Image: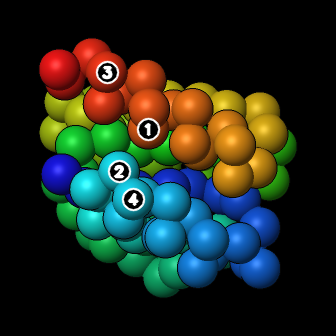
Amino acid sequence: MSVVIVGGNDCMVCRYKRICKEYDYKAKVFTQVPSDFKSKIGSPDLVVLFTSTVSHSMVRCAIKEAQRKNVEVVRSHTSSSNALKSILAARTEEAV
């Protein structure tokens, strides 16, 4: 299972990846807009948008790619580790 996290804080990237690993997800984290962002998203199982810490253009690009590849998008206003844990825990419960 893979997850793409869009937004969040630069200092939390390692923590986001560690949390995802605890829930058996492989994570890609984009806190800044890289060049050719659209192609770097790939085909994840889940896209998490931390809406308070991301630009509108990055959100639009991530949503457009997710819709094109039929990927679930979860939005969270806060970019805390607890927010990510609750998203992944709810997703794991759905799978069971």
Circle 3 is placed at which residue position? 93
Residues marked 1 and 4 touching at CB (< 8 Å): no
Q: Is residue 41 visible?
A: no
* Residue 62: numbered disc: none
Q: Secondary structure at mark 4?
A: helix
Q: Earlier in the sequence, mark 3 or mark 2?
A: 2
Q: Residues within 10 Å of mark 2 (few under 14, many from 20)?
A: some
Direction from residue 26 to residue 6 in the image, left or right: right
Circle 4 is placed at which residue position? 22
Direction from residue 76 to residue 17 in the image, left or right: left
Q: Earlier in the sequence, mark 1 or mark 4?
A: 4
Q: Alpha carbon of mark 1 to alpha carbon of mark 4: how far?
A: 10 Å
Residues marked 2 and 4 touching at CB (< 8 Å): yes
Circle 1 is placed at which residue position? 88
Q: Alpha carbon of mark 1 to alpha carbon of mark 3: how far?
A: 9 Å
Circle 2 is placed at which residue position? 23
Q: Residues within 10 Å of mark 4 (few under 14, many from 20)?
A: few
Name the residue type under label 1. Leu
Q: Residues within 10 Å of mark 3 (few under 14, many from 20)?
A: few
Q: Position of residue 47 (x, y in %)?
A: 40, 43
Residues marked 1 and 2 touching at CB (< 8 Å): yes
